[in-house]
Structures are given as C-alpha cells and as structure tokens.
Amino acid sequence: MNKATLLETLANKTRLAKKQIEVVLEALENTIIETLKQGGEVTLTGFGTFSARQRKARIGVDPRNPKNKIQMPSVRVVKFKAGKVLKEELKK
C-alpha cells in the first residue's frame, strides 16, 4: 500500500475529505520525525514504538568489488518494535 492508497482508504473509512486526511498524516509523520530527532520515542499503544538508535561504525564489503573492504561510519537509524495487538493480529 502506498501513501495515495492509504489516504483513499482512510478517507473511505472515516468519511473525511482526502485533503483532511493528508494534512493529519503529514502532521503525524512530521511529529514522529521531530520527536526521533530530539532523541525521544513515539509509542502508539497496541500498534508499536518508533525509536532512534545509533548503529556502530563497522567494516563492510564494497558491492562493486567484494575484495575491497570499506569503513562504514556510525549512523542513526529508526527502529520499530511492534506492539502486542499488532503482533497478535498478524498471527491470526
């Protein structure tokens, strides 16, 4: 499902205009991004938790030339931990 399909599905389920749904979805995205940038985490009870983690620097393999090793710097990455309700629904 892409963003356009998600907007259409939410508009049909809520009977709100697509433009309203788009504004809410963009606000949600921006809020999650800003919170993660500040080092916080966002928990949607039952659905899951978004958090930012620091991935350590490491040695990797150059995909164009597997014999060469390259240094990969440390980087911040997003982590998502699924909540209980989401996990249970997917098991069904």
Image (cartoon, rainbow, N blue to C red):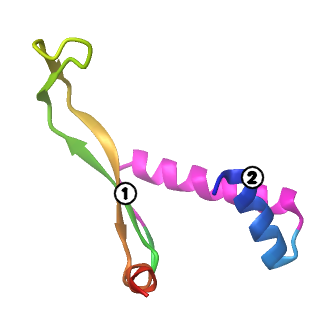
The boundaries of the magenta stretch are 17-42
At label 1, the amino acid type is: Gly
Q: Circle 2 sits on which residue?
A: 4
Q: Circle 1 sits on which residue?
A: 40
The quadrant the N terminus occupies is bottom right
Horizontal side of 87 relative to 3 (left or right) equals: left
Q: Is residue 25 above or below residue 33?
A: below
For image coordinates 79% across by 78% down, the residue present is: 13
Q: Position of residue 88 (x, y in %)?
A: 39, 86
The quadrant the C terminus occupies is bottom left
At label 2, the amino acid type is: Ala
Horizontal side of 83 relative to 11 (left or right) equals: left
Horizontal side of 18 relative to 67 (left or right) equals: right
Q: Nearer the viewer, residue 48 or 92?
A: 92
For image coordinates 75% across by 60% down, the residue present is: 7
Q: Please check the rendered image and state whether residue 92 is part of the magenta-colored stretch, yes or no.
A: no
Horizontal side of 92 relative to 67 (left or right) equals: right
Q: Position of residue 40 (x, y in %)?
A: 37, 57
